[in-house]
Amino acid sequence: MYFEKKTKKHKLFSEVTTKQIIVKIVHLFHAPNCTTTFPSIPTLFSLQNSNRPDFTRTLAAASGMLLDYCCCFGGRSSGDVADHDPVLLVSGIAGSILHSKKKILGISYETRVWVRFLLADLEFRRELWALYNPETGYAEPLEKGIEIVVPQDDHGLYAIDILDPSLIVKLVHLSEVYHFHDMIDMLVGCGYEKGTTLFGYGYDFRQSNRIHKAMNGLKEKLDAAYKASGGRKVNIISHSMGGLLVSCFMYLHKDVFAKYVNKWITIATPFQGAPGCINDSLLTGLQFVDGFESNFFVSRWTMHQLLVECPSIYEMLPNPGFRWEKQPKIQVWRQKSENEESSVVLESYGPSESVKLFDEALKQNELNYDGKNVAIPFNFSILQWAEGTREILNYAQLPEGVSFYNIYGTSYDTPFDVCYGSETSPICEISDVCHTMPKYSYVDGDGTVPTESAQADNFKAVERVGIDASHRGLLCDKKVFETIQKWLGVAPLKVKLQTRTSKVIDACSNCDS
């Protein structure tokens, strides 16, 4: 049924020629009620006939705009604006588009390197692999002469909306990369206006949650939302690791936070870490996309080499000072030889002891970049920095006058303990752990963050609500939306869909001949 609906939605583009598409798009964006700047028909035809790359880029961008605009793809503007306090959406780990910025012959170029499905693994290795610099505190690209930036289009919303905004991804509606998309639609439907009462904040999620660039960027975004709305305080909605970033900002810039923020709603935040997922990511990597699509995405090994040098990952290790109901463990079935006799033993490592395992397992870890072998061992400099971040998270306090709300996921098996090898197939060399698929023991949570960790925010919350949804699913869950609307004191506006639909149809039908 789902694919049948999808086929009907996109029938518009299956029966028209390229020139018909051009005419339809231009007519639509030159309609009296449309404010989008767009080339004329002769201009587009001349670009097409000259085979200039500008034509392909322009047509692709136009098609994307048409998909967003037409009601058959879900419009992004209600046509009405309500009187609301501004909302700032803050993404989490891997929840922002990243561009590689470089100069060629003095001209700056930007290429999307996260997220992308075409040449994903190759571009990821070339552009996003990095080494941590303890002098600066940043993970710096192996590729010389590039800078990793977050696009700021659409008031910061573009970078956290659809993480691969290519036309093909929109056509097949690849849900794995539809990040804040549905929540943005929901808020627009409640009368929020982009650039006035609705903003987004994406950042380089590889870096520390307290690094200067991330803190300064959040401060600028809060200031922009505050001023654009006429001096109204901002309501923050953060997801996952974004909640840790907000916590760090609140501790480091408490006065600024108190000045700009009215309410803070956090969703699926690993306040005390995400033991199973993060422990394993440092040892074997992480697979962000499952199933058939994973064949076109970044491989687990490629991701692993980045994560070992990511401060943000170390900052989400299980908090050793937290009173867990049961201490999270890493277990390894090891084969040991002594006096020419071999035996199999089960070794267990708690949050503090795990550092020894990370060190031994990653001691020989390396990658080949541009023909050179680069050592990527467990990074004690990052660990030391992350311990400082953990102190900040432990002591962060909510300023007086700021209301805090917490949504966390429940009813999903969530990795907690991790085990490598088995009694019948033990690990011989400890480095083999990095090439062994883990076995998990599970606790309740959202599939990524245990409920126990997400609930333990240490703040005086107005309300905490557990919702039956997965970690990413919480961003498009109906109950989550209803809860957020209640906390914000808003409701969906009544939209005259028929009027808007007829305008789109008229704009297209007038150019069929």
Image: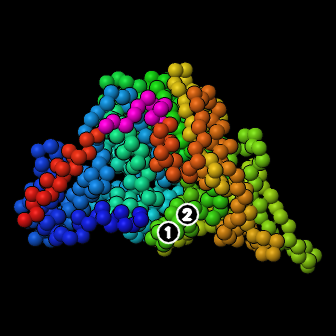
- Which residue is rendered at x = 75% and y = 70% of the image? 421
Magenta part of the chain: 484-494
**Where in the figure is residue 401, as x and y percent of width and height?**
52, 20
Taking 292 as reference, is 398 above or below it? above
Do the residues bearing badges 2 and 1 touch, measured as CB atoms within 8 Å? Answer: yes
Residue type marked 1 = Ser
**Where in the figure is residue 13, as x and y percent of width and height?**
23, 66
Query: Which is more N-terminal, label 1 or label 2?
Result: 2
Image quadrant in which you'd find residue 306: bottom right
Q: In the image, is residue 281 part of the stretch drawn in magenta?
A: no
Is 366 situated left or right of 428 in this image? left
Q: Which mark is residue 427?
A: none
Image quadrant in which you'd find residue 268: top right
Q: Is residue 301 visible?
A: yes
SS class, disc 2? loop
Is 175 situated left or right of 189 in this image? right
**Where in the figure is residue 487, as x and y percent of width and height?**
49, 31
Q: CA distance from mark 2 to mark 1?
A: 8 Å
Q: Which residue is mark 2?
A: 287
Q: Which residue is mark 1?
A: 294
Crowding around mark 1 (Cα neighbors within 10 Å: few <14, some 14 to 19, many 20+) is: some
